[in-house]
Image (cartoon, rainbow, N blue to C red):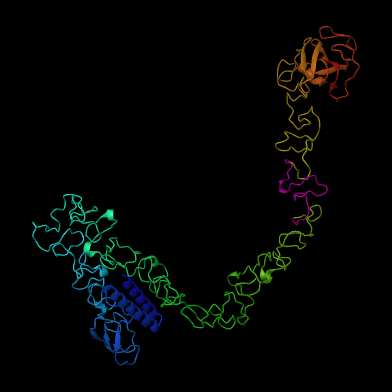
Amino acid sequence: MKRRLWSRAGLMAAVLAAACGDNSATSSATNASTTEAATEAATTTGAPATTEATTTTGTPTTGASATGTTTGTTGEPTTGEPTTGAVAECGDGKVDPGEECDDGRGNGIDQACTDECKQATCGDGLVGPGEECDNGADNADMNACKADCSANVCGDGAVGPGEGCDDGNQTDDDECTNACKLASCGDGVVAPTEQCDDGNQDDSDACTGNCTNASCGDGFLQAVAGEECDAGASNGVNADCTDACKAAVCGDGKVHDTGAGTEQCDEGPNNLPNSTCNPSCQLNVCGDGDKGPMEGCDDGNAMGGDGCSASCQTEGCGNAVVDEGEVCDDGQNGDQDDGCTDLCALPACGDGFEQPGSGEACDLGNGNSNNGACTLACEDAVCGDDFILVGVEQCDDGPLNGNDKACKADCTTQKCGDGFVGPNETCDDGNMNNNDACTNVCKAATCGDGFVQPGEQCDNGASNSNTGACTNACKTAVCGDGFVQAGVEQCDDANTSNTDACTNACKTAACGDGFVQAGEQCDDGNLANNDGCSSTCKSEVSAQQCQTGTDPFTNAPWVVCEANANSAWISANNTGTYTPLVICQQLGYSQVGQYGGTCGNVCGYCQGATSCGSPGAKTFDMAGKSCGADKLCFTVMWTCLK
């Protein structure tokens, strides 16, 4: 099939050359195809090969073609019809020089005139009129397709593939049966006239039922022989089943264009993008989206103005030709202000070219912006143009800019501390000091402005309150200021007395607070009974000799040395700091009598070992007051009175 592949490639080159306007290329490609075809055909049939397929005689006429008589390789003269001006091509219905025939649309691989304008002949590899098969050089009487292009069948007298014999008769009881099988075939013994004999009738193994070796073309599918198919005489280079008994596929180098085949070409491994034959075994043509060898481009359409013309030639700005889609083209002369830019477009603001002739001061193309250095009107950005230049200007209100306005004359935002009194400011002294007459929010200093100025202890602005942490006079709220601080104080009577209705801790006086107010006999700081002072702050005498306890505030230990209904003698039970009044009240007494040191004794005064069970001298020297007005400390003792 090499001849047909080459011829189609030549024809494709001619078609592409014609599309590009190259008549000489078309003629050369066609003649080369014809010469090669004739040479190959001569070699196949055994005739002497020639390098010049035809001899043409006649008188040339006006145009690209000549009129004359063409003598083919068969010696049969063919008279061509005169042509004037047109390019000769196979399929135009005219027998041109180098053609044996031309039936126009009647040309075909199965017609009297092939698609290459050659007379159909037995042995050309094409099944033409009157032929049952044609395997080209493989035609032979012992093969599936005989030398006369008739199918080798049982009974024709020629032993073909799969036949053990063929005596050309219909006598079934001689040595060769009507199934072309030797009478001895199948006995398991290979007779001299048998190729094999495996004793079975399985045609798909290595030995057929006719005792012939499995072979491509015998009409039996024998996978053991590597066959994918076997259509017998119908096998062919362009058939569904190839002459090698392989299923025809694109890329096998055989043009599958009969039966179910739709291939236009097949160059095997050379089926590639951008090649004459593409990977789908279709000829590469303009408009298929695959740039072929003779194409400058191929965008898959037949329209111009998109960079690739309808004839698959590259278009482009700068060729000094106004192509489809261009409004001008001055050859990209580099002058962007001459009425036609190097983009083949009329000058326009935003095209990226500065054109003073059109009144432009700048042009950054897509970079133009009313917030950039070059505005959308191709003007340089300046303060006062009503556009904010990002990174340079903070604001721009155009003619409304001013040092007393929200946007100042230099396009900076008005702010407190810049020295200019702007909107919503009552002053601006150019500093951020809150301790002068103008605060750093540009308001006149005053109590309640939220800033602590000299003379103020605090200033919480609108949060100032006589019941809050900062009073309306900008003073820090304290117990004793006469204002009850919400959530902190229960009362505030502006004094430090603990014996009135409000203690000096600004707590409402109550039984159990540790302070004896009017109406209370005692107050031991708790609401427990039977501890000397009842839960209603009435005195309870509960002291007993050798009774012990600890100071409610310091946990210092004490002991009762003596006790009766009117008085009690209390001593430190070691050493520590004591609150004598509270301890007396806990024991049911209301006041402290005498007190003094003990020189380290318990229930005694500066003498030997003493104790609550064996008390010593009851001497009070008024010592032990060094730790506070209501406290006694170290080794001390005191009396409690009713």
Q: Does the magenta stretch include residue 1?
A: no
**379 or 199, which is in the foreground?**
199
Q: Can residue 452 be seen in this view?
A: yes
Q: Say whether residue 19 is left or right of residue 217.
A: right
The magenta segment is: 441-468
Q: Where is residue 530 in the image (x, y as percent from the top left)?
A: 72, 15
Q: Quadrant of the N terminus?
A: bottom left
Q: In the picture shown, does residue 370 fall above or below 216?
A: below
Quadrant of the image occupied by residue 142: bottom left
**605 or 347, which is in the foreground?**
347
Q: Say whether residue 192 is left or right of residue 425.
A: left
Q: Say whether residue 36 is left or right of residue 438.
A: left
* Residue extending farthest top: 614
Q: Is residue 450 magenta?
A: yes
Task: Please name the residue shown 25% across and 55% down the image.
Answer: 222
* Residue extending farthest front: 192
Q: Position of residue 308 (x, y in %)?
A: 45, 75
